[in-house]
Image (cartoon, rainbow, N blue to C red):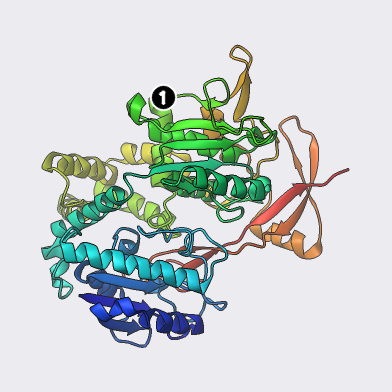
């Protein structure tokens, strides 16, 4: 069997981890190829080929203190998140959008602290499991790619491989129940103990929680785009669960973020039968009977209507960190320019432009789609490039506004107005439209540069709530350093600061007690 290992020689921890992994006895069954950052094969193309060709691929995604040094990030491809046989290892917590198919408590996904010993045991377990599945012929087939010319030749097979990987990963854990615990982050210690007790009581259950500060906290200020990006990263932890348990505390209904977790349940329940819907229960820590209770008589999100579902679909599509990088707004201007040229040029130029755009779009449509779906997708997209009215309607959405990308949003009102008390039903519930509008309506009149200056000068800021009352707020730099991987496109990095990594710089804002 063939195993290829990608890593950077400029990161001492990566070299140490590589040596530890290569000493594992399980690798005696493999023909191992090392591709380090000094190799001529250290490229996006070679990684893409290896991901589809080799039995196992290991990629070291460690982040150094100095992110200007050479890492694997400029050569990463989306398939590291899509393929079950690609193992991501790291000596540091991963960027938010590196989400491998194989994850575990002792893998570096969503963890701030983990031991080398536990990670090595996790890696060994994954290699043994893959070796067994490949030997038995129960794993999906690899593709004999040799070079760039094979990417188009085997395009359909590659797309089917991605789908088969997803199905394989789902089947691998299909017998285990999946549960997500929703809670306010200041109760983490209690929730962690509850998680351990729940796992002991339900040994065949996968229990998920997100540690405080890994994605976000209620005190942070982020752009609306970043807020929605993190919401849909939460959604990735929720979409395949059978049950969400609310760890009920007095302040649970105060935060827009806990509201977001419940709305993501409603979003995923759209179109499902009652039997297949995600169930919501709650747990009251001080209750005499330590049991999870059905939610029927407490907080529960409304069913989404079609317009709300479409709105969430748009937000999901336009805040994906792997496809909506900083170059997105430039691409929008390019669309406007092409549309204008098509409509204002002579017949020959206009026809050539349409032909070129149509050819480009055909290559971007998945080959595995049914013919009619391909045709309809091409028709709708071509209309945006050729019809100014259709393009203007499409771009009128908040997701294409500069304020959505570049202004800062903060929940000034506690409790969030998205949670409302229904007097008729005598229970808290969620106003979906208020929830959807909150990030844009809570924009504060300060830029990131201004907040940075306030932190340096230890000054407070003043904002006004919905009743026009002045609120004095302190500003501090968030201690948790978070990263987003941004792909290299067409051989060029999409950010200026670092090769393939962007730091999400966030600030904590808290009310000054008078």
Q: Quick one: which residue is furthest to the right in this view?
A: 514
Q: Quadrant of the C terminus?
A: top right
**Residue 299 visible in image:** yes
Is 496 positioned to the left or the right of 253 in the image?
left
Residue at figure coordinates x 20%, y 59% from the top left: 139
Using the image as rendered, state which of residue 42 and residue 225 is in the foreground: 42
Give residue 304's position: percent from left, percent from top.
Answer: 43, 26
Q: Residue at x 22, y 42 (%)?
A: 377
Residue at the (58%, 39%) spot, across then down? 258
In front of the other: 273 or 30: 30
The residue depicted at 15 percent of the width and 42 percent of the height is: 375
On screen, residue 337 above or below 179: below
Q: Is residue 244 left or right of residue 162?
A: right
- Number of marks in picture: 1
Residue under pointer 1? 305
Mark 1 residue element: loop
Residue 301 place in picture, x, y as percent: 51, 27
Name the quarter where the N terminus is drawn: bottom left
């Amino acid at each position: 069997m063939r195993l290829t290992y990608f890593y950077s020689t400029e990161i001492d921890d990566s070299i140490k981890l590589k040596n530890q992994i290569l000493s594992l006895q399980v690798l005696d069954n493999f023909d191992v190829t090392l591709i380090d950052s000094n190799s001529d094969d250290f490229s996006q193309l070679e990684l893409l080929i290896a991901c589809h060709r080799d039995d196992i691929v290991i990629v070291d995604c460690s982040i150094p203190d100095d992110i200007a040094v050479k890492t694997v990030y400029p050569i990463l491809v989306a398939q590291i998140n899509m393929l079950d046989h690609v193992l991501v290892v790291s000596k540091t917590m991963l960027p938010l959008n590196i989400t491998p198919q194989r994850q575990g408590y002792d893998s570096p996904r969503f963890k701030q602290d983990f031991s080398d010993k536990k990670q090595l045991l996790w890696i060994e377990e994954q290699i043994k499991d893959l070796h067994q599945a490949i030997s038995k012929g129960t794993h999906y087939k690899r593709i004999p790619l040799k070079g760039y010319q094979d990417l188009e030749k085997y395009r359909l097979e590659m797309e089917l491989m991605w789908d088969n990987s997803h199905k394989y990963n789902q089947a691998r854990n299909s017998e285990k129940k999946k549960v997500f615990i929703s809670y306010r982050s200041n109760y983490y210690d209690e929730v962690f103990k509850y998680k351990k007790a729940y796992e002991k009581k339900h040994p065949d259950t996968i229990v998920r929680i997100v540690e405080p500060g890994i994605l976000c906290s209620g005190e942070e200020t982020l752009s609306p785009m970043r807020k929605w990006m993190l919401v849909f990263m939460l959604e990735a932890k929720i979409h395949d669960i059978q049950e969400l348990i609310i760890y009920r505390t007095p302040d649970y209904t105060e935060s827009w973020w806990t509201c977001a977790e419940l709305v993501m349940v409603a979003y995923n329940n759209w179109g499902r039968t009652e039997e297949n819907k995600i169930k919501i229960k709650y747990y009251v820590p001080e209750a005499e009977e330590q049991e999870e209770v059905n939610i029927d008589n407490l907080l529960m999100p409304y069913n989404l209507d079609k317009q709300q579902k479409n709105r969430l679909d748009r937000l999901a599509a336009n805040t994906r960190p792997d496809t909506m990088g900083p170059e997105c707004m430039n691409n929008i201007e390019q669309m406007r320019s092409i549309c204008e040229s098509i409509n204002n040029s002579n017949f020959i130029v206009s026809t050539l432009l349409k032909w070129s755009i149509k050819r480009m779009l055909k290559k971007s449509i998945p080959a595995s789609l049914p013919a009619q779906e391909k045709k309809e997708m091409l028709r709708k997209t071509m209309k945006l490039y050729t019809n100014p009215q259709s393009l203007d309607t499409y771009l009128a959405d908040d997701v294409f506004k500069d304020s959505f990308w570049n202004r800062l949003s903060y929940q000034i009102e506690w409790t969030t107005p998205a949670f409302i008390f229904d007097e008729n039903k005598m229970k808290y519930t969620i106003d979906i439209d208020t929830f959807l509008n909150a990030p844009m309506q809570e924009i504060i009149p300060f830029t990131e540069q201004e907040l940075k200056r306030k932190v340096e000068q230890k000054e407070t800021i003043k904002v006004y709530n919905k009743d026009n009352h002045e609120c004095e707020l302190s500003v501090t730099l968030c201690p948790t350093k978070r990263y987003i991987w941004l792909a290299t496109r067409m051989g060029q990095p999409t950010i200026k600061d670092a090769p393939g990594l962007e730091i999400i710089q966030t600030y904590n804002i808290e009310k000054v007690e008078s």
